[in-house]
Amino acid sequence: MKLGALEAGGTKMVCAIGNENGEIMEQVSIPTETPEITVPKLLSFFKGKEIEALGIGCFGPIDVNRDSETYGYITTTPKLAWQNFDMVGTFRKELGVPVGFDTDVNGSALGEYTWGIAKGLHSCIYITIGTGVGVGVIVDGKLLHGMLHPEGGHILLSKLPNDTYEGFCPFHKNCMEGLAAGPAIEGRWGKKAIDLADRPEVWEMEAEYIAQALVDYTVLVSPQRIILGGGVMHQTQLLKLVREKFKTLLNGYIKTKELEDLDSYIVVQSLDDKQGIMGALKLGLLELERQS
């Protein structure tokens, strides 16, 4: 079976051809410019490839409510050129195949759940910490949707007394994205994360903010595993600190077999940064199965 996958990010669009086993046969990366410039390039990649379905994991916010008039649209994104762009309708019309659609980070959660470190579980959370913070959630084997989709990067955190940085999110200065994403690290310390590896105070603070968020996700969603990805998590010293601070903050309140082994409960992504594009393949497959 031939499937198309599109991981639509704010800076680049990754297009791939793969199959129902998550195997990638062909992949390209295209810069994210305006829809008028970028979309024809995306369509050109997929046309003539004889795909049976396309899955799109997209930057958001997006409309995932099938009963909505704007289902399949990018909605209130700060990337103004993409506001109110009909992703599903455009690709469905031009390619003539079923189009699965969800957030990019839900796609990453689905990739890890189907083929990665969450395989065999019934619930997990995937968190990407990079230019922004995104959270994908699977509960009872299904991607979580409600009024919208999870926007877990914007949960509010308690600011540390020694942190004088105001936060870079224009909506909430003390949300996880505002305090812990890559631009917050650079804004607070004056250098990019990659240049701060030898500054333990940087990672103590970062781990504290991440751990606060993980405690919130744990008590609210009760996932069997939490998976961390994104550029900030390439700092290898960070994972151990996050686990330690998570244990301190949770303070023994929840006792389960999963939480007895934090090395297995809080983990990093397992698919060599391909979880997003592999999840998009699965979105396409699920939509094909739904329509047939």
Image (spheres, rainbow, N blue to C red):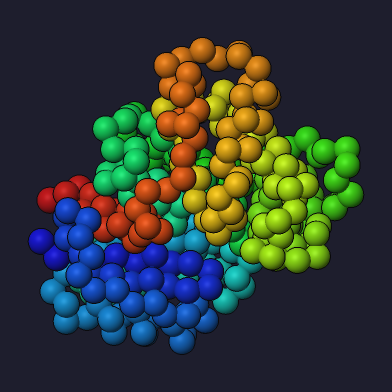
**Left or right side of 46 for 60:** right
Furthest residue in direction front, as rendered: 198
Decide which of 174, 225 is in the foreground and name it: 225
Q: Is residue 185 left or right of residue 129?
A: right
Up-down: is 157 above or below 36? Answer: above
Side (left or right) of 179 relative to 268: right
Q: Number of marks in the image?
A: 0
Residue 36 visible in the shown view: yes
Can you give x and y, in whole percent of width and height, for residue 102 in the image? 40, 53
Question: What's the residue at 20%, 47% (across, down)?
Answer: 290
- The answer, for residue 172, to whether it is visible in the render is no
- Residue in view at x 75 percent, y 66 percent: 191
Q: Nearer the viewer, residue 141 or 89?
A: 141
> Quarter of the image containing the N terminus?
bottom left
Q: Decide if residue 277 is on the left or right side of residue 58.
A: left
Compare residues 136 and 209 and report the one nearer the observer.
209
| Residue lying at 66% horizontally and 31% vertically, measured from the top left | 245
Q: Does residue 228 sit above or below 272 in this rendering?
A: above
Q: Position of residue 65 (x, y in %)?
A: 42, 48
Write down the quadrant of residue 258 in the picture: top left
Q: Position of residue 20 (x, y in %)?
A: 16, 55
Which residue is painted at 44% across and 61% down in the image? 58
Point out residue 248 in the picture as x, y percentages from the top left corner. Answer: 67, 23
